[in-house]
Image (cartoon, helix red, strand yellow):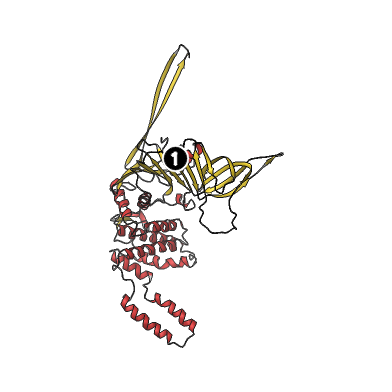
Amino acid sequence: MMRDLTEECLRILNKGFFEITDPGPLHQPIRSFSIRRDEKLNLILETEAAPNATSAAINLPPGTVRLTNERALLRSVGGLEGEFFGLVPYSQNRQTLGVTEQPLKELARVHVAKTNNPSGAPAAYVIDWLENLPTSPYVWPAASNVVTRTITTRRISLNDGITIASDTDRSSTSWNSAKVTVDGATFYVCALDREDRPGAIKPGCIVYDGAPDDQFRKKVRTGLSFAMGVYLVDLGTSHYDAEWNVVSTLARSAYSLRRHAFDIETLQLAPLGDRFVNELGAPQLSKAIQAFVTAFDSLDLANLHWAFWHACAATPHIAPAHFGAAIEGLQSAYTKANPGKVQEGWATRDEWKILKTALSAVIDGGNISLEAKMALKNKLPTFNGIDQRQRLKDVMAALNLELGDDEDAAWRRRNKAAHGTPIPQGQEVAAIRDMKLLRGLFQRLLLRMTNAADQYIDYASPNHEYRPLRQAPPTIG
């Protein structure tokens, strides 16, 4: 049965009376173990084994690049199954006290930890556990109520006395949730309190009324992340039956942009309410998430989400290159999904085929070395390519979006960062605004391509004005 609204997997593994039946690369025999998260939210397994414990792990040369697929299997006295996957032992510590050898303590990184109840009922609910889901600055549309009941029984004069019983309810209410429906699936987004959650920073979860599959829930997390303007750290998942008994759990070593995710300012892409700043309206949030879920595959949002948030975490001297890459990736996905809307080259395919043959013949007849001819022929496929500045203008025109003068200038300067050009002294403020303009340009394109909103928030200009998507940020200076 669920105890608290917090991820279940580590609690079950640490308190479920498990034994390791197949140690994989770990030293054995294993007497005890515990699993925890470190400060970077990685899963760390600590085992205690006999002093003479041995391991079947294969020693690999330092620097070996490979996929880690080692695993250990577990079973509890109650019949639960468990698994540690992506297991990498990295520290062994043996100590001797006098003439007595102490137990071997071993540390290992774990990519994924799982538990499963093979006799459990079918899953009726799913919870995705998150970090970096903020309660503020947002004003959430729905409240959550927690009632804690304490029962006290006092027996006076044990054998022939009296029993006094009482119960006390403590209730707390927080405005921290939103009910959302996407593709017919209903779920609740909840920002949680840090109390009773050691190490938590901005804990949260998504509670599904039903058991949608992993891919759908990944799309929802991506859409929620874009809509709210936060990088959501995925900690894992729990499945429950109709009575809220745990059926299965999963915890993963979470990626938090090396903890930079918690430092990125929360900036929603578009207004999510119609009354005041930072309002989260359930209809607007549902519309935005639905739009991103619908466009997830056609626009390759899994990859673009990754690129965008790494750009947001980058420092000003290199961030323009990252945002430029994200924008180019978004343009490529759009043109691939919408053939014919944007010209692919200066010449049509048939025209270029004829022209390429003619150019190749000219190169063959040139009085140059064979090596030079080969080099020039290898460059021919790029001759008909449209440069990125023109490609951006074409995509913006196809989407009925203005390209502002400052946006155009920031776009032209983005490659300086990629080539290591330092920010000129005295132009630091302009470089930071370039970063804001490029982020805003990505957001405008994304909102228009997905139809997630009709307005955007202009973070590159004073007062963070709401503007129609078509309208570019004004020129400053």
Judge whether 366 appears above or below 274 on screen.
Answer: below
Measuring from the top left, give residue 14's x and y in whole percent: 51, 38
Q: Residue at x 35, y 70 (%)?
A: 390
Q: Residue at x 44, y 80 (%)?
A: 376
Q: Residue furthest right?
A: 99
- Is residue 466 visible to the viewer in this orientation of the structure? no
Furthest residue in direction top, as rendered: 160
User: Where is 450 relative to 129, above or below?
Assistant: below
Residue 201, position in %: x, y? Answer: 46, 44
* In-front residue for pair 431/389: 389
What residue sits right under mark 1 in the picture?
A: 8
Residue 415 visible somewhere in the drawing: yes
The residue closer to the viewer here, 224 or 120, is 120
59 left or right of 124? right
| Image spot of residue 405 (x, y percent) | 35, 66
Depicted 343 relative to depicted 10: above or below = below
